[in-house]
Amino acid sequence: MPIELLKDLAYIEGAWCAALDGATFPVTDPANGDHIATVPNLYPADAERAITAAQAAFQGWSRRTGLERADLLWRWHALVVEHTRPLAELMTRECGKPLAESIGEVRYGASFIRWCAEEARRGYGDVIPSEQHDRRLLVLRQPVGVVSAITPWNFPMSMITRKVSPALAAGCTVVLKPSEETPLSALALAALAHEAGLPAGVLNVVTTTQAREVGHLLCTDPRVRKVTFTGSTAVGKQIMALAAGTVKRVSLELGGNAPFIVFDDADLEAAVDGAIASKFRNAGQTCVCANRILVQRGIAERFITALTERALALRVGHGLEDGVQLGPLINDRALAKVERLVGDAVEQGAQLLTGGKATTGRFFPATVLTGITPDMACFREEVFGPVVPITVFDTEAEAITLANDTPYGLAAYFYTRDLARSWRVGEALAFGMVGLNTGLISTAAAPFGGVKESGIGREGSRHALEEFTEMKYLAMAGLETR
């Protein structure tokens, strides 16, 4: 029987609850402003209740075997898959992305639960050969403790499962603060975890508009031993500084400025397909989307023509409408930023080939700009919108220099059919993730994360659980073995 997924209460210690003072805030559809639900507006005192619940639940949860934790994760995974359609519809209503993308995200998010369920039984340690006959040297992996997870609005389900699943699999308990823009997806996931039998206090969801105040508590309370955050680099730096006060472990997945390089020898059609897939997913509101298109002069005219034709054909509208490929920007601030970056580029001499102005409300059409130079704001900043800034280059060395000319280092992409160039460029790009001849790189099986000012730590892959464990060395003496 389907489970009611639209929840209007926070989730603490296995129960649905209001704020202590009864405060609430509305959740609206970014496409049309329609009211979807009203949820509790929790303050630090409420969040402290969640931390207390997570701390109390930690002892019992951490002592369960990996197999026991895996079984619960498998049940959660099955329920998420079973409710793919209603979860996706809810996601589209609160964050605006087209329904087909939302369905894909639910499946992608579920894949992290499945992966971590499989990995829960593999918390391997080490036995180190001792130089003394009466000693054995062991290394254990133990859960770090209570985890605070702070997640963004642009992937309101998969960013949660990518953090919560490995934490739970490792034996940690979690206090989750989702974005105030998209709390309903988080509450829906909590409802399914509750139905799966997750013990009270193991997962807690704090809904709030008081991001600074609640976030401060989640980063400074000494009972919280790990903070995992996805969001802007500016906020990530603040979190890192706050966590330092109690020397918490941190995982930070921060801003990006991804180059998308197309060399002369690239498969043109594949490169255009990859650029469209990377740039316009969620209306360009992704941290790994192509932010700067660098195309070699010999192929530039044909590539720009083909890309512009494809951009013009993208249908803009409400994500629940059939055939829509571009939804709205998340809020008015996001719209103003995109308009500012496009305006700056045009004022400095860039050519606007298509788009460039909001059609209505928060809908911004696919926009292609050429003649982009490194001193333009759209080359330096993360656009976070459906805008394609194109720069033409001549040599491979020039492309690498342009690509690496950023303090960010999350994702990069390049297209070539030259095997030697594949190795040279792949190794030269200063980014944590590189896509060769593909614009889509995310998978639960691979480590996701950046370098430089794009973050610390990795999510996904066999390394995911390591982020939520401490290494303990155990020296065993007095063993008469000979």
Image: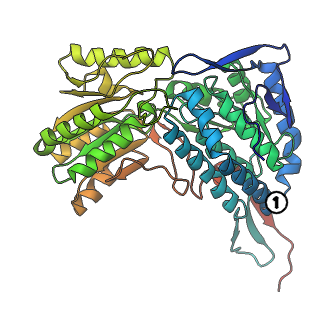
Give left or right: position of 238 versus 136.
left
> How far from the left and from the top, in percent, is residue 68?
82, 60
Which residue is situated farthest in the front direction here?
A: 322
| Quarter the C terminus occupies | bottom right
Which residue is situated farthest in the bottom direction here?
A: 482
> How far from the left and from the top, in percent, is residue 9?
79, 26
| Residue 459 in view here | no
Q: Return the residue nearer the eye: 211 or 280.
A: 280
Q: Where is mark 1, residue-wise? A: 68
Give left or right: position of 289 versus 342.
right
Q: Return the residue nearer the eye: 423 or 347.
A: 347
Q: Residues within 10 Å of mark 1 (few under 14, many from 20)?
A: some
Could you tell me the amino acid type at mark 1?
Answer: Glu
Q: Residue at x 81, y 43 (%)?
A: 194
Q: Residue at x 27, y 31 (%)?
A: 312
Q: Return the residue nearer the eye: 286 or 105.
A: 105
Disc 1 element: helix
Q: Residue at x 13, y 38 (%)?
A: 301
> How far from the left and from the top, in percent, is residue 282?
46, 34
> How far from the left and from the top, in percent, is residue 323?
42, 37
Quadrant in the picture for residue 398: top left
Q: Residue at x 31, y 50 (%)?
A: 428
Please, is residue 211 above or below residue 467 in the view? above
